[in-house]
Each structure stands twice: as C-alpha cells, then as structure tokens.
Image: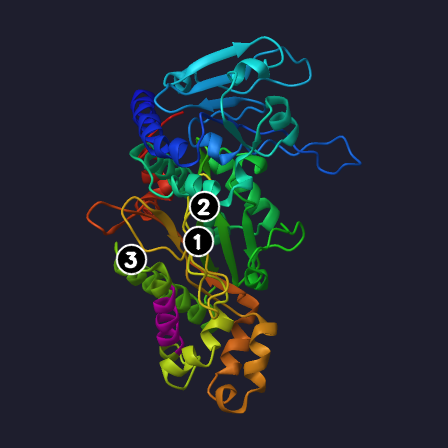
Amino acid sequence: MTDSITALHRLHVAELERRYAPLFERFALDVLVVHAGTQQKKTRYDDQYWPLRPNPHFQHWLPLEEAGALLALRPSKKPVLWRSTAFDFWEAAARIERSIFEPFEVHEVDGPLPFASVREAGERGLFLGEDDAVAASLGLGRADANADLLAAVDALRVRKTPYEIACLAEANRRACLGHQAVGDQFATGDFSELELHLAYLRATGQDDAETPYKNIVALGAAGATLHYVRYDHGRRVQGTDSLLVDAGACFRGYCSDITRTHVRGSGDLAATFRALIEGVDRFQQILIDRAVAGLPYESLHDESHALLASLLVDSKLFHGDAELAVSSGLTRALLPHGLGHSLGLQCHDVGCASITPRADNPFLRNTSIIAPDQCFTIEPGIYVIERLLAPFRAHAAIGALVNWKLLDALSPFGGIRVEDDLVVESTGACRNLTRPHFVSSPKGAAARDGAVFLA
Ligand SMILES: [Mn+2]
C-alpha cells in the first residue's frame, strides 16, 4: 500500500517539474528556493511556539513537516532538498518515511545549513517562504513580493494530480471515522461539546494541532455561529437536541473538510428540523450532480439559493414565491456564507478565487470555472442568525410572508450545514470523496475496511 503512494508521489514530483519549468523563463529565474517554514512564537512576550504549519508551496513537493528545510528548484534539474539533521536535545526529530526523498537530490547536514552552497554563485533567484531572515541569509528577495509570480505558483496547485487526489481521498476516509463516531455518541449519550470534540480526535487519530482547521462542534443554538470553536465543557446533550460538526483530517498535508448536522428527539420540532436536514442534504446532492466542467462555480452558488428558497416554501417557512425569497435577500440572510471553496494543502486552497464574486456573494471563495482535476467543497446550509434576520422581521411586505413562529421555534437548533469534498473527473462530472465512507452498517465498519493507505 505504501508502495503505491510512493509511486504516485514520484509521478507527482515529475509533473510539478513540468509545471514549474515555464516559470523560470517567464520570471527570469535560475533558481527558486522554497522554504518549509520557521516555528512562529505565539506572542513576542512569550517563549511558547505554535506548532509548525509548513509552507504549502513546500508541501506541494513533499510531505516533510520540518522547520528550516529548503528546496532549490532549477529548470531541467532534479530538485535539491537541504535539511539539517543536527541533534537538538529539546525537540524530537520529525517522523519521516524516507521514501518521500526518492525524487530529490538530498543534502543532509549535521549542523546549520550552508546557505552559501544552497545558491550557486551568479544565479538569479528568489525565495518562496515567510522567513525574511533566511531569505537575507541566502541573499534572495521574496518571491511573493511579485504578485504575478505568486499567482502563477498558486495556479499550479489548482489541478490535483493522482497523488494529491489519493491523499485527499485518504483525508476524507479518516475524517469520516470521526463523524461516524461523534454521530453515534450524540445519538445515545449525554456528552458535552468538549467530549464530542475529543471523541472526534480519538476516532481520527489526530491531536487538535494536527487537524486541518479547528473542529466546529456545536450543540443546539451554537450551530448558528459559523466558526464556533468554544467546546463548552458544561452543557450536555439533553433530550431533543441538535449537533453540527464541521471537521476534517490531514493526510500528507492534504485536508478534508466535512460537515454533518444531527438531531435527536421525537417531538414535532425535532421532526421538522430533521426534515430540514434531509431537505438540505437532498439539494446539496442536486448541486453536486449539476457541478460539471465548464460551469462557473458562482452560478452553482446562485442555484443553491434557488434550491434553498424552494425548501423554505416546501417547509412552510416562507409563504411567498420562491423567487421572492431570493430576490429580497432572505435566502442570503439564512445562508450568509459561500457555497464552497477549493480544497488541497490548505483547507481554503489557493488558485480558485482570482475573480471577485458579485457584490451579493461577498463571501464566496470559489469563483473559478469548474474544470477537471479541481477539488472543492459543496456546503449549503440554513441558519437562524437573529441579527441577519432582524431587517426582514421589520420589513412589512417580506416579513409578513415569513413563518416567524416556526423559525423562532427552530432557533434553539441553531443551523444546518451539509458539506462534502468533490474532485472533478476527466469526464467533467464530480466524484464525491466523502459519501462513500458514510456507510451506516454497523458503526462505520465499512469506512474502516476501505482503508487506502496505512501510513
Ligand atoms: Mn468548508
């Protein structure tokens, strides 16, 4: 199994060499030095550091999570990796599978890196990384000071290679183990948000710092706070209740980003909220079916509002025309975020937002034309956010068409979001990386059996 990922990685590096090649001539470069990163202090007054988040442009080449490593890229030459193996009695060395080094010329130095050797005399070069001190030691200017160069490098990350798609699929499999475990616990036990968050970490085999983004684990009304990461210790699941979990996993630096919403209880309100979850789930899948190569992602975002409007009418939350729910801005008050974003080494990946969205879609992070090998999320929802709804409450014409009694009764359930990760295949249709792992037979066993890579 590890052999296959190693083979895919080797092909991936060869593909990156091809993709980078035109940049050297275009930007008059002999060498581009990519830095893995430097650990960042939490504040300048403290001696605590954040865990290293490697430069994604470095991780694009190899999954090495090691501060200080350097990659020297030159046209038509094997990429050169520099890393220090100096003994440090404070820190444990990074866990490394040596097969990741195979496509590179590797220089391991038992001491500080010899910056004068990384760059050859007379070479025209730039530094792609955050640490100005390292750039200065190499005598190089920052590549990201050139917006065109940065955009060109970002663009190389949009089309995922088979290696990257395998990593994203594995990141999905792992995250689904967590979603399955948390869903089971919520259904049967009286747990707190913190306990559900910890259950997710345990089931996915991740420390909090290893997740692609802070898990969102929200009970009840907290589900309406889009980036809720409080992990309440005291409040427990009780009786009729709802849970929104937005959480992913990482594999070789690649992220998954998945959201599921649950409800338990047997009353009328629980049934109504359950029907709304099913409604969002249904129209999310309609959107996925419609997501085909050639379509602007923004038009899919617009369709999500039309579908949400129909759901509002069908659920008797809105008594007017579905079109009016969209044109009045009501659907945007109930669903204020974008339909989705590109996904890769960053949870909100680069390269798909170079076009500014329309003014009524201010938070849309994907404005690209859908194309093969892109990877992105589709994550519609509906939330009861009083401050956004207040203008409609006060609006004579629209306000009279909203079923406030029902909406207010649902507000303790917070909100709903259903999010899957997709990759566009060569046929132009999307493959769902998430759904195949949600097999309900017994407690996620199928998801575990589907293991792709063991590393
Ligand atoms: Mn997302």
Distance from Cα at disc 2 to Cα at disc 1: 7 Å
Quarter of the image for residue 103 reads top left
Whether residue 192 is visible here, answered yes or no, is no
- Do the residues bearing badges 1 and 3 touch, measured as CB atoms within 8 Å? no
Residue 323 place in picture, x, y as percent: 37, 81
Front tag of 3 and 2: 2
Q: Amino acid at mark 3?
A: Ala
**First reached walking from the N terminus: tag 1 or tag 3:** 3
- Do the residues bearing badges 2 and 1 touch, measured as CB atoms within 8 Å? yes
Distance from Cα at disc 3 to Cα at disc 2: 19 Å
Quarter of the image for residue 355 reads bottom left
Tell me if the residue at label 1 has its CB under 8 Å from ligand 1.
no
Number of the label disc, if any, that sits on residue 25: none
Residue lying farthest right?
A: 45
Q: Element under label 1?
A: loop
Q: Residue at x 48, y 83 (%)?
A: 403
Q: Which residue is mark 1?
A: 353
Residue 107 place in picture, x, y as percent: 49, 12
Residue lying farthest top?
A: 110
The residue segment tinted magenta is 301-312
Q: Element under label 3?
A: loop
Number of the label disc, if any, that sits on residue 291: 3
Label 2 neighbourhood size at 10 Å, few (<14), some (14-19), many (20+)? many
Q: Which residue is mark 2?
A: 350
Q: Amino acid at mark 1?
A: Ala
In magenta stretch: residue 304: yes
Q: Which quadrant, please, contains the N terminus?
A: top left
Who is closer to the viewer here, 193 or 33?
Answer: 33
Q: Is residue 9 above or below residue 106?
A: below
Label 1 neighbourhood size at 10 Å, few (<14), some (14-19), many (20+)? some
Question: For this view, does 166 lie left or right of residue 266?
Answer: left
Q: Residue at x 66, y 28 (%)?
A: 133
